[in-house]
């Protein structure tokens, strides 16, 4: 048994007393075992100079240890004339953790100052400060909403923090001071209510640790978070219902092609979606493309993948249409040189068929149709195109497929010669994805 009789996966008792200070917009006394921290939130109707006019707010923190919060007296940092490195680090960590779960645009041009003052330290003061500060912050933002200064509560999720570590060969949760100073590995974990990680601070104090042990410690931390979130919710009472814990919707990209996945994630990565590909679903069989058009194939793939995974699925069918070849290879672009053909084989066949064709007759265009299949809703489709010509030989080392042969009309270079950012801006897929992005944003907004 651990000091205090706790099991390895048992957190110290946590108690929160809200509205602890008379004047602060939000405040809480958090007690984690013998560690005690007062967290308060103060609202200031201005932002740092570098944020003025940006239409968003800021959350920052100050942290301090009272002189006799520890076993021996520590001088106040103000008397030393400077803030210590540890204090600086903790203040920044608290600010980052809270900003991760707040819509700063919805906050408006305001600064929320979080003051976290340690009355008594017995290990885990920074994690207690984050966990308690969230409750004080939620109280303050709810007060602003009740006063009509905010249209809605900008808190998007819960956030809490706890420590895990290795001591005497065992993974343990929530280290008290006696364990902290003797730990082989000490790690602080900050996590949202949606089980998303904000920060991991792990150090091999006495010995290194394996990936397997890291995974076990993170699992232990997640168990501790569940307890902390329940304490936060109890402390906030009905206010907890205002905080919408949103599960990120999953979007499955119906492809194994790493080039496509990279492009798609580049363009859609800013959306609040868990984006994955068919590599994450090895049990899903290939979908045979039997459609006569790009749109038919995209719809077929998206709806099949959505049905098999139960998630939103995004599929595209794209290819090259060459005017001299009456629109070929078209829907057969990926298998132009036969089933299982490589990009090099497809390009070689195209060059062979076009070897006597003059520049004036080498017009071509890339076409991309994208289908978004959503369980229980109608499938939506968009199409993008890009005009150009076929080169007489491959140019450039980037891209994939026919990129080394397709000269963009706008850039005068092949897709393989363009940086990914430039290619995405003008490509058929980039244009179709821009339309898809609008569709996804509308869908996310509709579902609140």
Image (spheres, rainbow, N blue to C red):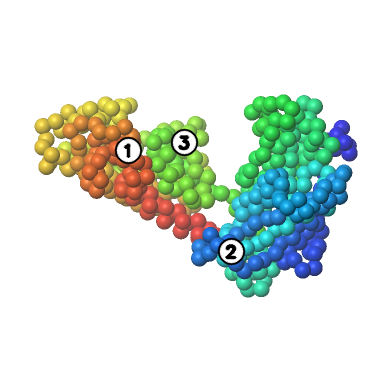
| Tag shown at residue 278 | 3
Are the residues tagged 1 and 3 within 8 Å (C-beta)?
A: no
Can residue 31 be seen by looking at this rendering?
no
Residue nearest the observer in this picture, 207 or 310: 207
Judge whether 10 appears above or below 42 on screen.
Answer: above
Q: Classify 10 Å Cα crowding around label 1: few (below 14), some (14-19), many (20 and above).
A: few
Q: Position of residue 264 (x, y in %)?
A: 42, 43
Which residue is labeled 2 in the image? Answer: 47
Q: Looking at the image, which residue is at 33% across and 34% down?
A: 398
Q: CA distance from mark 2 to mark 3?
A: 44 Å
Secondary structure under tag 2 reads loop
Q: Position of residue 21 (x, y in %)?
A: 80, 64
Residue nearest the observer in this picture, 188 or 90: 90
Q: In the picture provided, is 295 more to the left or to the right than 154?
A: left
Quadrant of residue 218 in the image?
top right
Instruction: Choose the circle earlier in sequence order: 1 or 3.
Output: 3
Q: Looking at the image, which residue is at 41% across and 56% down?
A: 438
Judge whether 140 appears above or below 126 on screen.
Answer: below
Residue nearest the observer in this picture, 25 or 310: 25
Instruction: Choose the circle earlier in sequence order: 2 or 3.
Output: 2
Q: CA distance from mark 1 to mark 3?
A: 19 Å
Secondary structure under tag 3 reads helix
| Tag shown at residue 290 | 1
- Of badges 1 and 3, nearer the viewer stands 3
Q: Quadrant of the C terminus?
A: bottom right
Q: Quadrant of the N terminus?
A: top right
Secondary structure under tag 1 reads loop
Instruction: Choose the circle earlier in sequence order: 2 or 1.
Output: 2
Q: Looking at the image, which residue is at 50% across and 65% down?
A: 53
Q: In the picture provided, is 166 more to the left or to the right than 197?
A: right
């Amino acid at each position: 048994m651990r000091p205090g009789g706790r099991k390895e996966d048992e957190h110290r008792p946590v108690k929160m007393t809200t509205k602890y200070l008379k004047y602060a917009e939000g405040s809480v006394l958090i007690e984690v075992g013998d560690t005690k921290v007062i967290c308060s939130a103060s609202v200031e109707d201005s932002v740092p100079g570098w944020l003025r006019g940006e239409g968003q707010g800021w959350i920052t923190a100050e942290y301090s240890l009272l002189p006799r919060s520890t076993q021996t007296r520590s001088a106040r940092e103000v008397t030393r004339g400077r803030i210590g490195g540890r204090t600086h680090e903790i203040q920044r960590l608290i600010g980052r953790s809270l900003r991760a779960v707040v819509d700063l645009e919805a906050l408006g041009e305001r600064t929320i100052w979080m003051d976290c003052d340690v009355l008594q330290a017995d290990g885990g003061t920074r994690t207690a400060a984050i966990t308690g500060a969230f409750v004080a912050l939620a109280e303050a933002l709810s007060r602003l909403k009740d006063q009509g200064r905010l249209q809605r509560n900008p808190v998007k999720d819960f956030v809490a923090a706890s420590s895990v570590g290795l001591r005497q060969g065992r993974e343990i949760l929530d280290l008290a001071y006696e364990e902290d100073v003797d730990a082989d590995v000490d790690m602080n974990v900050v996590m949202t209510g949606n089980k998303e990680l904000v920060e991991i601070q792990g150090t091999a104090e006495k010995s290194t640790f394996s990936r397997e042990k890291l995974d076990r410690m993170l699992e232990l931390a997640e168990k501790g978070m569940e307890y902390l979130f329940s304490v936060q919710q109890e402390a906030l009472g009905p206010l907890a219902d205002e905080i919408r814990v949103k599960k990120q919707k999953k979007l499955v990209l119906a492809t194994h092609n790493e080039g496509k996945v990279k492009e798609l994630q580049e363009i859609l990565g800013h959306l609040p979606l868990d984006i994955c590909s068919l590599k994450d679903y090895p049990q899903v069989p290939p979908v045979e493309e039997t459609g006569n058009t790009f749109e038919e194939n995209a719809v077929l793939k998206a709806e099949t993948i959505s049905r098999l995974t139960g998630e939103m699925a995004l599929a595209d069918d794209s290819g090259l249409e060459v005017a001299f070849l009456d629109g070929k290879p078209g829907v057969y672009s990926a298998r132009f040189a036969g089933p299982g053909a490589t990009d090099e084989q497809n390009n070689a066949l195209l060059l062979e068929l076009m070897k006597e064709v003059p520049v004036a007759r080498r017009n071509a265009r890339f076409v991309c149709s994208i289908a978004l299949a959503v369980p229980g809703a109608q499938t939506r489709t968009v199409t993008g195109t890009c005009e150009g010509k076929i080169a007489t030989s491959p140019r450039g080392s980037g891209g994939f497929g026919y990129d080394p042969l397709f000269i963009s009309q706008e850039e005068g270079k092949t897709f393989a010669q363009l940086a990914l950012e430039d290619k995405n801006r003008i490509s058929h897929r980039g244009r179709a994805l821009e339309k898809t992005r609008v569709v996804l944003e509308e869908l996310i907004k509709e579902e609140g």
